Amino acid sequence: MPSYNLCILGFGNVGQALVRHLQLKTTELREQYDITWRLTGVATRRMGWIADSDGLDTTSLLAGQLPPVSSALNVREWLSLAQADVLFELTSTDASTGQPAIDHIRTALEYGAHAITANKGTVVHAYEELNHLARERGKRFLFEATVMGGAPVFSLFQEALPATKVLSFRGLPNSTCNVIIERMEQGKNFSEALQVAQSLGIVETDPTLDVDGWDAALKLCAISTVLMGVPIRPADVQRQGVRDLDPETLRAARAAGKPFKLVASLERTANGVQARVQPEQIAAGDPLSGVNSGSMLGHFVTDMLPGLTVALHVPDDPTAGPDVTAYDVLADFLRAVR
Amino acid sequence: MPSYNLCILGFGNVGQALVRHLQLKTTELREQYDITWRLTGVATRRMGWIADSDGLDTTSLLAGQLPPVSSALNVREWLSLAQADVLFELTSTDASTGQPAIDHIRTALEYGAHAITANKGTVVHAYEELNHLARERGKRFLFEATVMGGAPVFSLFQEALPATKVLSFRGLPNSTCNVIIERMEQGKNFSEALQVAQSLGIVETDPTLDVDGWDAALKLCAISTVLMGVPIRPADVQRQGVRDLDPETLRAARAAGKPFKLVASLERTANGVQARVQPEQIAAGDPLSGVNSGSMLGHFVTDMLPGLTVALHVPDDPTAGPDVTAYDVLADFLRAVR
């Protein structure tokens, strides 16, 4: 039975949730997938390069008891000390460059490990290069967690919907904005609503990424690049966030049964795609209407299916988002090695 | 490049749509999947056992110009004359026994062909046996088209959501009933609404299968058997159809923003599952609300994802249903051989 040495770079909420999932699923992975695993490396800027090719004690690690730092000075040396088979790249996203995550993934693939990431920047800024490198090395570069963490998007088309072409996309890929809108409908102003969302732990460290639509724009770029074959960058997206929405207008729209949501859309044009993020009213019966504030949703029109919707409903709970994102990362691991 | 000999048993709307899809995707299958195909057998009770291992002329066939019938006297001889690699079993469903489709699939697997079906009866009445036989012979028994034709359900969990356990299901798996309810809301009585649905070509030959909830019950049985590991039969489903719904009540519910839909649900219990089909009111924001009359939808609660919804939106059009069902059958073919 193959055993895989796993390394996690970036050990925040998602990385910790991933280790809990791995612990929980150990028996299932062994019995149903013939897979065993050891965590042989964990690294963050704060913790340093922890590595042990015999396997780290995950329970101590989750309790905050850290083993001594290794002699590694960089990602490459760390992967080597950890004898890594898989790198989980879980550092936070730099929207404008995708760095240093892109370098981490390049290093892992060149070292000979599968690279799995939750970092949108790597897909938006380096999909072609990293995908090509992975194929060349016979490894996988997987990133299901980057868009609608928890809901299958890339694996849905790559595995469950073969020979399908995506013609257009319309969705609610950023639940944070919809939580903010829902709180504003309930009487809060924008700043108060943002504070509520922050207290739920669902806002990016830099809140402009969420509220000005950058996060949704990055996700559109990833979908356009990977599923529509049209690489676009955030600057190509017409973008309007939720900052200037007026609570009165939002309340009236909700009362009329057509609430506002931050909608992201992609349409094929003669030369490529038109990409747009903006608040829109959603009528009853619209495929985008079956959601609560915490939901993420994508609606795809394809050449074979006139309209397919995938939605993930996540409770307003600080642990729910990292948990489902970490599930996607785990699923990518199983896809990479099976 | 491998070439596959395909045989279609039952050449109604879905079978014909499958041949059109195969024609349309020929280049894509060759270039992206390294697959070529020939249709070497077609059979129906009316047409007889048509077989030609050199390949039939699909365009003539779709135009109704039939080649002479072969000397085959049964499925086994027909598959042999056609040198079949894949059987598409597309005969109509016998809800109470699953026959003769089960025998057709058993014969195909024993002969050494993959068996792909749109026939719910085969999954409900013989999943364990046929799945076991397929594994034993190194072939696949696939049936994505049996539940919510077009929307990935079985392949979603088997391929895109590894290591996930389905805890409960709630959905709208029968669009026909929801078309009938919507017409009743618009002022028609039950018989008139049924006639509209029949004129759209979306009602089973025996309409009681749809309107009394048998079709939805069969789909619940398939989901429970395959995705929850609890084999149940239609008689185990608490079942109430749409026949006795009152147009006034339906209109009032719609006006109040909580329209009725025929809802099918599965809940795990101490001993197995509780399965139920019945009309229920759907409030705004419910995962089941984002649909129009022709939509099919499934909402899954799993151990890893708190709520995942998949919905397929199909226009009220006689060709739309067979087209999406035939896509599922095509996708199963690609899964079987890749």
Image (cartoon, coloured by chain):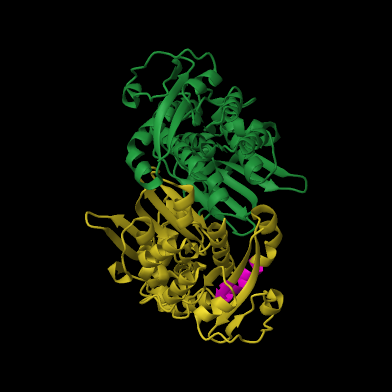
Chain colours: A green, B yellow
Seen in the picture, residue B50 relative to A259 is either above or below; the reply is below
As drawn, B178 above or below A242: below
x, y percent for residue A151: 48, 44
Q: Is residue B210 rendered magenta in the image?
A: no
The quadrant of the rendering that contains the N terminus of chain A is top left
Q: Identify the residue at horizontal 47%, vertical 69% (top origin).
A: B109
Is B280 located above or below residue A139 in the figure?
A: below
At horizontal 43% and vertical 69% (from top left) the residue drawn is B120
Point out the stretch of residues depicted in magenta. Answer: B7-21
Q: In the figure, is residue A272 to the left or right of A77?
A: right
Residue lying at the far left in this picture: please name it. Answer: B270
Please, is residue A108 above or below residue A32 in the view? above
Residue B153 seen from this side: no
Q: Is residue A94 visible?
A: yes
What residue is shown at x 69% (from left), y 62% (from top)? B26
User: Where on the picture, by quarter, is residue B337?
Assistant: bottom right
- In the picture, measured across the screen, residue A271 lies left or right of residue A165, that is right
Along the line of sight, the residue nearer the viewer: B306 or A61 = A61
Is residue B16 a member of the stretch shown in magenta?
yes
- Tally the numbered discs: 0
Q: Nearer the viewer, residue A46 or A138?
A: A138
Q: Dividing the picture into quarters, in which one does residue B5 lie?
A: bottom right
Could you tell me residue A287's position as x and y percent?
53, 53
Tell me if A47 is positioned left or right of B40 in this view.
left
The percent coordinates of residue B4 (x first, y second) are 61, 65
- What residue sits 69% from the left and 58% below the top? B30
Main SS of the magenta segment? Answer: helix
Give x and y (percent) for residue B299.
Answer: 42, 53
